Image (cartoon, rainbow, N blue to C red):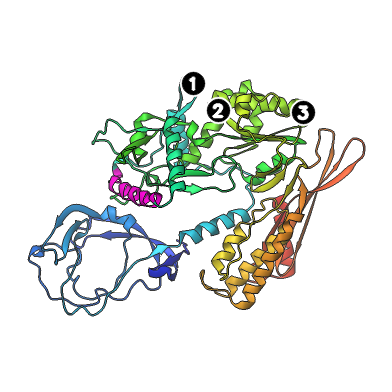
Amino acid sequence: MAASINILGIGSRSAGRTRGAATVTLSSIYDSTSNFKVTAFVLNILTPTLPSFTTSIQWEHLRGLLLADPDFSRPGPIDVIIGADSYGLLVEPEIIRGRTTEPIAQRTLLGWIVLGPVNDSTSSSVRVQHTSIDDKIDLLLTKFREQEELPSDSAPTPEPEEASCEQHFKDTYTRDNNGRYVVRLPFKAPPSSLGDSFAGAKRCLHQLLRRLSTNDSYRELYNEFLQEYETLSHMARATNMDSSRSRFYLPHHGVFRAHSTTTKFRVVFNGSFKTTSGVSINDILHTGAKLQQDTVDVLLWIRRHRLIFTTDVTKMFRQIAVHPDVWALQQILWVDPNNQVVPYYLTTVTYGLSCAPFLAIRVMLQLVEDEGHDFPLAISPLTKGRYVDDIFGGAETLQDLQETARQLQEICQRGCFPLQKWSANVKDALRYVTSESRTDAVSINSEDPNLKFLGLEWNSTEDNFKFTLQTSFHQDVTKRTVLSETESLFDRLGFISPITVKAKAFLQELWLAKLHWDDKLPVQLQEKWLRFQASLSDLSLISLPRWLDLSSTSKVELHGFSDASMLAIVAAVYLRSTSADGTTTVTLVCSKTKVTPLKRLTIPKLELSAALLLAKLM
């Protein structure tokens, strides 16, 4: 199968990219039924011959054992490196030890393996083997590719696992006496496959406490966050520690969010932490279907309405309770006032579990299904104008906008989803929003009307989009920093395509130069990038209208344009709106650019590609 992944070794040195991946069955030389399958990435060279020396020492405690590799003491080629994530599938409990200066024997599915010190003077050199996937680069590339793709018009066919997750939700969700939703975790494998996580989580906690002891403000924020967690009953001290039940302890750490208007600091939990069996809780959970609307669709829906409001759900994930039967599988360790380590249950949907986004969004859709018949004006904001916990509502008249805001608040209250950070582009839009939810709201008469708006900056007074970008000027520019800063040019509607296409073309130039991710750029390329960075300060001069000037009486035309050059292809869509009094406006709806392939095509072929891009955009 295809797989091209950057592999890092000791010192973060690149070991090259994988040539693909293959499923390999490993079996014992003594019993072919003792086997397991792994997915292995393919490299040109794995290691030099191992071991790097020959030893003739015989250890008494190893005599008579059926060794997985009877010739382990003789140098030979290495065919497969088994990662720590698969090690738990291989090992068995029994260990045989000799003296402290001698190796131990570990029983495995393939036979006994030998590891540990070898006191042999013939040892001439040391081989150190360590590899890891450069997942930060892969994450950046994934984000970059997602921004490059247009949203699909048709709903994807659910995969069997997604269908199973959906059915599990329907069969197991309930609501308590207050209307709050209660869900269960959607497992695809039994929790019994989890090993021990307590020791690892405790080790992570002690490392965290050492960091907190050196930073008073960080420690105070951490304590306040978890104290609030407990006060709101989103976590509770663990009781009834039944040793027969599977359990999982999530390590945690703090994250600062400088641009947040509400929660500047939060604690996040690591559901991908491996237990002693090599399996994490995320490994045995369904991820669920992608239910979230694409940002392009949400932004275009918002632009249709003359009057709009924005709000968001307070602590959205944590407003959904998790059934007590699975609390043991989402525990954390923290310290009490006496600095004693104490286990806690997390009692709500926990950010950091792979199923959490699915559960949160699925519950919101279930709320619409359960209560939408009483609040018809709230259905569109919750299905078309919502992006995770941000909700947007729109209308043509002030009266309709006020009623939409009222109905939205009431339907969310029925599901125990409080709303906050209300804002609107017209005075009195929020008159009927109850005072309780406006206590922490962003005032519509705020001295600073600039709000973050799905990655854009929206000025609610002028009702237009603006662009600001915090650029970082690095002394040593690398391909990694260029990709990171290009990805930060978030422009889903293509308002600044003439700028972003230059960054994408520059990235392609770096690929042609065959530079490694952390190689310093040649002087000529570095100067070119710095000039481009300096030009980004002019982005603040650009503003575009948020509203497309649509109304129920408007005559509307869509006009599309496409073109191509040897550098890039482009498509742009404009909306021409003529009102009842004959006034005509033309507004950019969206645009899209793509750099041309490395394999050069003729201009006619590129123009056909641009026309296809335009057809998809329309």
Quarter of the image for the N terminus: give it: bottom left
Q: Is residue 439 visible?
A: yes
Estimate the x, y position of residue 171 in percent, counting from the top left. 43, 29
What amino acid is labelled 1 in the image?
Asn
Q: Residue at x 28, y 50 (%)?
A: 276
What stretch of residues is rendered in magenta? 193-213
Query: What is the three-letter code of the residue carrying label 2?
Result: Leu
Q: Find disc 3 in the rendering and name its residue.
A: 398
Does residue 570 appear anywhere in the picture?
Answer: no
Q: Is residue 322 left or right of residue 512?
A: left
Q: CA distance from mark 2 to mark 1?
A: 13 Å
Instruction: Give yes or no for residue 163 being in the magenta stretch.
Output: no
State the CA–CA distance, disc 3 to disc 2.
Answer: 26 Å
Label whose residue precedes the other's in the sequence (3 or 2): 2
Question: Which comes before the other along the chain, label 2 or label 1?
Answer: 1
Element type at mark 3:
helix
Disc 2 target residue = 367
Percent x, y for residue 153? 64, 45
- Asked if marks 2 and 1 touch (Cβ < 8 Å), the reply is no
Residue 143, horizontal then vertical, whole percent:
56, 55
